[in-house]
Image (cartoon, helix red, strand yellow):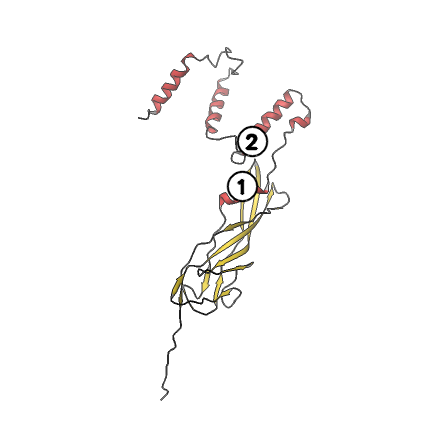
Amino acid sequence: MNPAPADALLALEQMRANDLPTHGGRTLAYVYDSGLAEADEVGRAAVAAFSGTNGLDPTAFPSLLQMENELVGTACDLLGAPPTAADTPRPRITPAMVLNELRRIGLPRLQARTQPEGKTLVNFDTIFYTEAQPFSATVILLGRQVEMVAEPTGYAWVHGDGAVTRTTGPGAPYPSKEITYRYARAHTTVRPRVDVTYTARFRVNGGPWQDIPETVTITGPETSLRISEAAPVLSGNYG
């Protein structure tokens, strides 16, 4: 049975029964007691605020990296270290770090649209297109502001019958016929989609833009498309 919170705190307090006091100067080699109640209160609040963080990954908790750099810099100043030692080099924000952040956020999944919509004819030029827009976001990495922009640059049209058409543009609705496809089998339902490849760039603290060499491909949602066959129909009086 799990202990109640009060019981857990009581057990921890009992564990400390034989510990030396942290106030009064008896453990100066291990604990610095300022003698200021306000300092103790701020310290407890700070520990509580950061109790859930982990300094192993500065990309996830850049605040900890900033505190570490400031602490090292202050120590260098107090010890009279050369200025170069106080200027702790900040880790560089790499394209791989930004790419991981883009993957974490998630790029848009674009839907393949067809004309006719939902139902088309065999051996007919079915139009394919999608509505593509650049994606932008701003995040904080290693304590710095990073602006990211990802643009669709490649499209793989998965037609649902085993065929794939690759283009560099998103196509357009009728009357444009930039991207068309003819299905060869009638009386079947396919599930086409479009997989979009994004090319991204970023800049740090308003600096110059940097390209990310690696691309990200996002699989689009499937849609349903029925393939039918046109039947000839006689009309009028031909007698």
Q: Amino acid at mark 1?
A: Val
Position of 78 with respect to 133 (left or right) is right
Gap between marks 1 and 2 measured at Cα: 16 Å
> How far across and down, in percent of the image, does residue 153 sit?
56, 55
In front of the other: 43 or 57: 57
**Quadrant for the N terminus in the image:** top left
> How far across and down, in percent of the image, does residue 235 sit?
37, 81
Q: Secondary structure at mark 2?
A: helix
The label number, if any, that marks residue 65 in the structure image: 2
Residue at (38% x, 64% y) in the render: 188
Looking at the image, residue 239 lies above or below residue 137: below
Residue at (47% x, 29% y) in the render: 49
Q: Dot 1 corresponds to which residue?
A: 139
Q: Amino acid at mark 2?
A: Leu
Depth-wise, is mark 1 or mark 2 nearer the camera?
2
Q: Are marks 1 and 2 in contact (CB under 8 Å)?
A: no
Residue at (45% x, 27% y) in the render: 48
Q: Secondary structure at mark 1?
A: strand
**Quadrant for the C terminus in the image:** bottom left
Number of numbered discs on residues: 2
Position of 210 with respect to 162 (left or right) is right
> How far across and down, in percent of the image, does residue 102 sit?
52, 45
Position of 181 with respect to 228 (left or right) is right
